DNA sequence: AACGAGTGCAACCGCAGGGCG
DNA sequence: CCGCCCTGCGGTTGCACTCGT
């Protein structure tokens, strides 16, 4: 993909780095006067020596009055984790379901969150490797069954399975048989195979609490949810 | 007080995709 | 259909700040 000619022109003699208060004021004034959009016109209209991308980013991630500041609440983190399990690194989509949060916020938070989580896992791993009698099980290198089931689900275009259906399915197979949706109950998607092994140790209470954490799907079907996305 | 490591987040960069002539 | 332009997204970087030694 070639860069547009405007990008090349913009890159010369333009300011970079941190925004000053004065620049912020100019940008705010411009947005208030002309509204959001037409970013290629914003630097000229505002009298800013910044590229259009920089202006857009500054507005969307910082100056926009709808942005919520401060730490993420437990609910927000919870929802973020679930959405990430469903959508992957689609930060803008995830941010779209977290009112007042920007994709940059979500992405930054997630990277921090994942970093601390990985370190925790490393520590856990270290402790586990200290066991003198450990037996190392070979890990399957192919797709796990749940992922294959998910593919079938997507291919079949039957997205009508609601939380109720999931619970019914759980009731039928809670004894350890893998169901594709179970992988969505994890807090990350780092390694499904490891999770599947981990799942075998869940008791019914743990499994039910994971299922019930899907309350945000209570009133909608999967097709509703996917359609919204 | 000084310094280095760690952390959080603003900002940049490259690219993909859609609209339009 | 093709090429150009614009917009927006996601990965990455860099810097300021905090904290521990």
Image (cartoon, coloured by chain):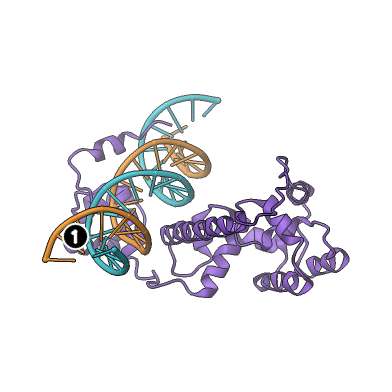
Chain colours: A purple, B orange, C cyan
Q: Position of residue A206 (x, y in %)?
A: 72, 72
**Residue A30 in the figure: left or right of residue A126:** left
Can the viewer see residue A190 in this picture? yes
Name the residue located 76 percent from the left edge and 55 percent from the top edge: A180
Name the residue located 23 percent from the left edge and 51 percent from the top edge: A17
Please state, as top left, top right, bottom left or bottom right, where the N terminus of chain A lies in the image. top left
Q: Position of residue A132 (x, y in %)?
A: 66, 54
Name the residue located 39 percent from the left edge and 70 percent from the top edge: A66
Most foreground residue, A104 or A59: A104
Residue A47 vs B21, above or below: the answer is below
Q: Position of residue A39 (x, y in %)?
A: 33, 51
Can the viewer see residue A35 in this picture? no
Please state, as top left, top right, bottom left or bottom right, where the C terminus of chain A lies in the image. bottom right
Most foreground residue, A75 or C17: C17
User: For the view shown, which residue lies furthest in the right direction?
Assistant: A172
Q: Position of residue A9 (x, y in %)?
A: 25, 36
Most foreground residue, A55 or A193: A193
The residue carrying pointer 1 sits among few (fewer than 14), some (14 to 19) or many (20 or more) residues within 10 Å by Cα, namely few
Residue A151 vs A124, above or below: the answer is above
Q: Which residue is mark 1?
A: A20
């Amino acid at each position: 993909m070639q860069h547009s000619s405007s990008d090349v022109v913009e890159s010369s003699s333009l300011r970079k780095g941190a925004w000053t208060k004065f620049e912020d004021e100019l940008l705010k004034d411009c947005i208030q006067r002309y509204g959001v959009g037409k970013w290629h016109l914003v630097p000229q209209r505002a009298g800013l020596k910044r590229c259009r991308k920089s202006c857009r980013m500054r507005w969307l991630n910082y100056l926009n009055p709808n942005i919520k500041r401060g730490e993420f609440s437990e609910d927000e983190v919870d929802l973020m984790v679930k959405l990430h399990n469903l959508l992957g690194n689609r930060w803008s989509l995830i941010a779209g379901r977290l009112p007042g949060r920007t994709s940059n916020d979500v992405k930054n938070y997630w990277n921090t969150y994942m970093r601390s989580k990985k370190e925790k896992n490393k520590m856990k791993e270290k402790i586990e490797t200290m066991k003198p009698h450990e037996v190392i099980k070979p890990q399957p290198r192919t797709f796990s069954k749940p992922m294959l089931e998910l593919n079938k689900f997507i291919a079949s275009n039957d997205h009508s399975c609601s939380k109720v259906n999931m619970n019914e399915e759980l009731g039928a197979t809670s004894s350890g048989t893998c169901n594709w949706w179970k992988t969505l109950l994890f807090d990350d998607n780092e390694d499904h195979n490891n999770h599947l092994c981990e799942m075998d140790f869940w008791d019914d209470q743990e499994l039910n609490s994971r299922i019930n954490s899907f309350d945000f799907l209570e009133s909608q079907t999967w097709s509703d949810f996917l359609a919204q996305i």
